């Protein structure tokens, strides 16, 4: 199991066994390089811990723990975490500020305790096979080494993937493998009694009119500045070099600006760009680097996508189709040549209302005033219109019975009619409220909440944990790089939740209160630049270097025999994309990622060989520049 994920921790390995329990660890050494070998015991060796992540406030916890009589033999955050559990039990996790997945074996109780951080930055997969035990790991591939593991595919998880392009907690593509949700703990004893509980939930965003009447925008700005600066400072603590991803967007630029103000040394920054101008943000990133005199490294990429795509997708262990994984992998590979730790800007859009989908959800609430009878008529018109008719998807969206269904229609990776036309009936989701509630559970707010508030809460829980943070963790750890996210500090998230929505987003603009607090740190050009995602020229690649791979796989007898898509509509969709009549890149990428996963699944033994693509081969032609 440890060998299967050597890429996550190339520096060290440790294993401890005691009766029915065995725990193992692959370590990427960040804090206390010399005495931080895991597993680590407490003073009398009655408890042992393995830990993935970082606890940023461990230096504050240490004197408190010493005051209660605990003795330290290392300088690690791992030992502080263990003594916190020893002191307070399960409730000790609430004191932690950081990203973590850890397991503690209590020899006296003969009980294993597992916990995952509040946002789910670090993963925990597990499988319980009654009579044979409970197994857990940071990646699915570790569990697939178990001969006794049933490997049936979870068909419901595949249906979810075909709409949303990722598989949310607690599902996985394997029926018997589950994900411990963010903010949860789990215990299992010698008799295999399993208990789970939740210790934290993202606070519901404050709706307009429900805010604290004594809170002013000026005070909110002061609070944001204080907590944000503290969050960045804590994440700069390391015994190895620290850098930052600098995309040219607001969030990563604010992180870099704040880092520069907290150190006398130049901040190491890393940016990626494409030869295609519309996807290249290097000029904007360079403005920030120049303003703060960072040690700036930029890379202009034309990747060998034919070799890169299968290798990259392998690290997810299940179907995953967020194409921004490609630049995330490449910039992680680039940064890992210089540092072991980087800070990123992830989380700003979710907490402070930066996504265009939020503006759309807010604007579309007016459709709720349309009488139900008229909505039924519009739904019929949408269904009857030809597939290529303009406005067909819009008519369906406004005909939905509620704002939640409308929101999920708009943020799916493919339209309802595209899925209806291309997928066989058994693989289509019902696309109704009952299905969404069953799929996302507690990530959905009560019906009375307004559309914007519900959208922000969903993005900050299910979408963030199931998509964004999965992408960042796998692509960075594939290159043995640790990524820290100051904007996802739980104290900052709790503060953001107390602020009314109108302070965050209005008139098609987002992150208003964040910018009001901190925009003086940014070059003016960034404030007027249009928002871009961390995108790739996927549509052009599917008409160019990836065209042959795409067509070969999706028109193969092997893929067609799976019974997921309808042959002729899929071929028509490929031809439609080739001709440029319509951009079908997002859905084609979903299907390509799925078929590549099927290929990996049929060839499981090759998954367990240590694979370090950052070292073994070049996956891109690059032009690098350091300033």
Image (cartoon, rainbow, N blue to C red):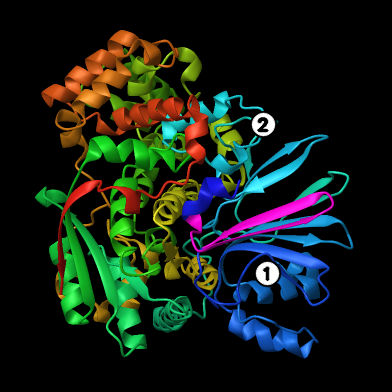
Quarter in which the N terminus is drawn: top right
Q: Looking at the rendering, which quadrant does residue 62 occupy?
A: bottom right
**Front one among 147 and 566:** 147
Q: Is residue 131 visible?
A: yes
Quarter in which the C terminus is drawn: bottom left
**Label 2 environment density (alpha carbons within 10 Å; few <14, some 14–19, many ≥20):** few
**Front one among 71 and 370:** 71
Q: Which residue is mark 1?
A: 94
- Dominant secondary structure (helix, strand or loop) of the stretch shown in magenta: strand
**Front one among 97 and 441:** 97
SS type, badge 1: helix
Q: Which residue shows up at 54% across the image and 32% down it? A: 173
Q: Is residue 461 visible?
A: no
Residue 23 in the magenta stretch? The answer is yes
The tag earlier along the polypeptide, 1 or 2, is 1
Relative to 218, residue 11 above or below: above
1 or 2: mark nearer the eye: 2
- Give percent across and percent down for residue 338: 31, 69
- Give percent across and percent down for residue 403: 45, 40
- Give percent across and percent down for residue 69: 80, 87
- Kindly identify which numbered label has been placed on residue 147: 2
Start-end of magenta stretch: 8-27
Q: Looking at the rendering, which quadrant does residue 561 occupy?
A: top left
Q: Which residue shows up at 18% across the image and 18% down it? A: 575
């Amino acid at each position: 199991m440890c060998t299967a994920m050597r890429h996550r921790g190339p520096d060290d390995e440790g294993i401890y066994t005691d009766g029915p329990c065995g725990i193992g660890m692959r370590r990427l050494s960040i804090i206390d390089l010399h005495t931080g070998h895991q597993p680590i015991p407490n003073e009398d060796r009655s408890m042992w811990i393995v830990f993935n992540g970082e606890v940023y406030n461990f230096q504050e916890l240490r004197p408190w723990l010493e005051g209660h009589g605990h003795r330290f033999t290392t300088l690690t955050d791992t030992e502080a975490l263990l003594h916190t559990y020893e002191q307070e039990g399960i409730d000790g996790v609430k004191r932690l500020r950081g990203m973590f997945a850890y397991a503690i074996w209590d020899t006296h109780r003969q009980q294993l305790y597992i916990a995952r951080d509040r946002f789910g930055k670090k993963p925990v997969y597990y499988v319980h096979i009654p009579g044979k035990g409970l197994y857990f790991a940071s990646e699915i591939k570790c569990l697939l080494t178990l001969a006794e593991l049933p490997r049936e595919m979870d068909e419901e998880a595949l249906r979810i993937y075909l709409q949303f392009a990722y598989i949310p907690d607690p599902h996985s593509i394997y029926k018997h493998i589950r994900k411990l949700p963010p903010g949860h703990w789990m215990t299992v004893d010698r008799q295999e009694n399993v208990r789970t509980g939740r210790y934290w939930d993202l606070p519901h965003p404050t709706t307009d009119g429900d805010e604290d009447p004594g809170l002013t925008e000026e005070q909110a700005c002061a609070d944001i500045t204080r907590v944000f600066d503290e969050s960045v400072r804590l994440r700069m603590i390391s015994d190895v070099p620290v850098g930052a991803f600098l995309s040219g967007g607001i969030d990563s630029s604010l992180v870099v600006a704040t880092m520069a103000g907290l150190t006398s040394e130049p901040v190491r920054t890393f940016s990626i760009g494409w030869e295609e101008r519309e996807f290249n943000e290097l000029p904007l990133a360079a403005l920030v680097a120049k303003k703060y005199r960072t040690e700036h490294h930029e890379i202009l990429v034309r990747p060998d996508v034919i070799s890169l795509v299968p290798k990259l997708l392998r690290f997810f262990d299940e179907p995953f189709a967020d194409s921004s994984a490609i630049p995330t992998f490449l910039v992680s590979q680039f940064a890992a040549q210089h540092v072991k730790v980087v800070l990123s800007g992830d989380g700003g859009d979710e907490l402070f209302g930066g996504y265009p989908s939020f503006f759309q959800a807010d604007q579309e609430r007016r459709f709720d005033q349309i009488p139900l009878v008229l909505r039924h008529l519009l739904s019929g018109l949408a269904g009857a219109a030809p597939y290529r008719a303009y406005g067909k998807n819009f008519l369906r969206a406004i005909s939905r019975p509620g704002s939640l269904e409308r929101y999920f229609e708009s943020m799916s990776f493919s339209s309802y009619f595209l899925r209806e036309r291309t997928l066989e009936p058994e693989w289509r989701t019902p696309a109704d409220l009952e299905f969404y509630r069953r799929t996302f559970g507690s990530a959905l707010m009560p019906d009375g909440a307004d559309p914007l508030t519900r959208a922000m809460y969903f993005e900050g829980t299910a979408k963030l944990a199931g998509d964004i943070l999965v992408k960042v963790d796998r692509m960075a750890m594939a290159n043995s790089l640790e990524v820290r996210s100051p904007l996802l500090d739980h104290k900052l998230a709790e503060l953001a939740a107390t602020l009314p929505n109108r302070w965050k987003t209005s008139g098609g603009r987002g992150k208003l209160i964040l910018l009001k607090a901190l925009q003086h740190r940014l070059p003016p050009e960034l404030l007027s630049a249009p928002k871009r995602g961390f995108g790739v020229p996927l549509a052009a690649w599917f008409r160019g270097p990836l065209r042959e791979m795409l067509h070969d796989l999706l028109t193969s007898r092997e893929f067609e025999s799976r019974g997921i898509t309808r042959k002729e509509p899929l071929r028509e969709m490929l031809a439609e994309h080739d001709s440029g009549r319509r951009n079908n890149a997002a859905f084609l990428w979903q299907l390509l990622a799925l078929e590549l996963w099927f290929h990996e699944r049929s060839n499981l033994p090759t998954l367990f060989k240590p694979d370090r693509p950052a070292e073994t081969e070049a996956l891109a032609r690059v032009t690098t520049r350091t300033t």
